[in-house]
Image (cartoon, rainbow, N blue to C red):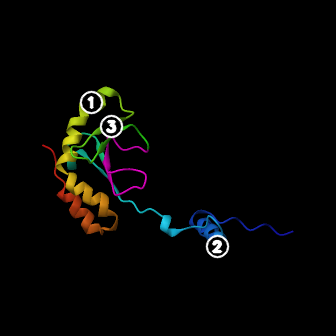
Amino acid sequence: MSAKPAEPRGFAGEQAAIGDAAGKAGAYDPARDEMVEIVNLSQQRTGVAGTIFISTRMAAHGQRIKWLPGRPERDGPCLVVTLEDPPRAINMGLPLRVARASEARIEAWAALNRDALLRFWQDGVVWLEEEVAAFLDGLRKLP
């Protein structure tokens, strides 16, 4: 009796599944892939204590940034700050005293950099490394 060949793992497994699904309902559609650029900005760059998360357009979310009181963590409590004029902070699970103590400064930073953040949101996913670096260097820091 011969042993059954091992199932492909990782990327090879994903590619095998794509090949098997070709032509079937629910087959892989590269047009559904979402390219996203994200950056976690430190206090050194922003002048705001904590971390500011910025990204390019994400399908499920409007134009916004996130502020975290410490290092970033996936799905951790944060302030979501819209890029409206004026920006508006929405508390997503932070202790109320932390959110209230920080929101004015984060909203001020978002307002100061709104135009650049909106350009990054809209077009940053197609920027080359040098363009992303120039964008980051152009962000203004609060005193």
**Residue indicated by mark 2:** 23
Q: Label 3, secondary structure: give it.
A: strand
- Mark 2, secondary structure of its residue: loop
Label 2 Cα neighbours within 10 Å, binned few <14 / some 14-19 / many ≥20: few
Which amino acid type corresponds to the residue marked 3 in the rendered image? Ile
Contact (Cβ within 8 Å) of mark 1 with mark 2: no
- Specify whether residue 55 is painted magenta: yes
Quadrant hosting residue 68: top left
At 54% from the left and 68% from the top, the residue drawn is 29
Q: Position of residue 73 (x, y in %)?
A: 40, 43
How many other residues sit within 10 Å of disc 1, few (<14), some (14-19) or many (≥20)? Answer: some
Q: Position of residue 130 (x, y in %)?
A: 25, 68
Residue 69: give x, y in percent of width and height.
31, 37
The residue under the point 15% across, 44% down is: 142
Which of these two is toward me, 77 or 56? 56
Q: Amino acid at mark 2?
A: Gly
> What is the CA distance from the residue labelled 1 to the residue labelled 2?
53 Å
Residue at the spot x=25%, y=67% of the render? 131
Looking at the rendered image, the quarter that the C terminus falls into is top left
In the image: residue 103, left or right of residue 28: left
User: Considering the numbered disc 1 on the image, is that residue within a helix, a strand or a loop?
Assistant: helix
Q: Is residue 121 above or below residue 43?
A: below
Q: Which mark is residue 134?
A: none
Magenta-highlighted residues: 53-74
Which label's residue is closer to the chain start, 3 or 1? 3
Q: Which residue is mark 3?
A: 90
Considering the image in quadrants, where does the N terminus appear?
A: bottom right
Q: Which residue is mark 1?
A: 100
Chief secondary structure of the magenta span? loop
- Residue 15 in percent (x, y) is at 59, 69
